[in-house]
Amino acid sequence: MAEHNETGKKGEQLAAEFLEQSGFQVLELNWAYQKYEIDIIAQKGDTLIVAEVKTRSGNYYGEPEAWVTKVKQKNLIKGAEAYIITNNLDLDVRFDILSIILPDKGEPKIHHTEDAFYPLL
């Protein structure tokens, strides 16, 4: 597996653990439907959380969350719609971004942006 893929998988696992420690129930990791893929689907109370995880070894090229493009947001929204329909859910939906920095030395840094974007804007 390429190093960047391993970095991404490690970041997704750290993000899932972070969410669980924060009281979220992780429902899915890397859920895919057709061409849409969602890194983490979680639930807290009556809210479904659709989370994109961006992991980098540093922030040389800016913060990882800045790399969630409008196209990616649109695909996350469509993926969330498919998940809700497939699972017959009646929950509020929130789109979050978890930014993970994995430095060569020291502890990973996790930044959780709740309501990172809105589907109607």
Image (cartoon, grey):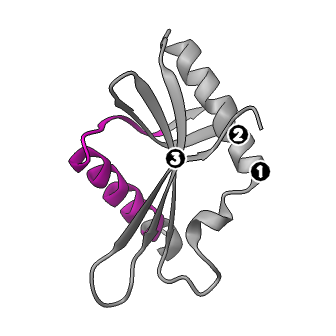
Neighbours of disc 1 within 10 Å: few (<14), some (14-19), many (20+): few
Tell which circle, 1 or 2, labels the residue nearer the N-terminal end: 1
Was residue 36 drawn as part of the magenta stretch in this picture? no
Q: Which residue bears the numbered disc 3?
A: 96
Nearer to me, 23 or 107: 23
Labels 1, 2: front one: 1
Q: Secondary structure at mark 3?
A: strand
Q: Quadrant of the C terminus?
A: top right
Residue flagged by tag 1: what amino acid is it? Lys
Q: Secondary structure at mark 2?
A: helix
Instruction: Give residue 70's mark.
Output: 1
Residue occupying the point 73% across, 56% down: 69
Nearer to me, 42 or 7: 42
Whole-Å distance between the Cαs marked 1 and 2?
9 Å
| Residue 42 picture location, percent across and down | 39, 35
Q: Secondary structure at mark 1?
A: helix
Whole-Å distance between the Cαs marked 3 and 1?
14 Å
Labels 3, 2: front one: 3
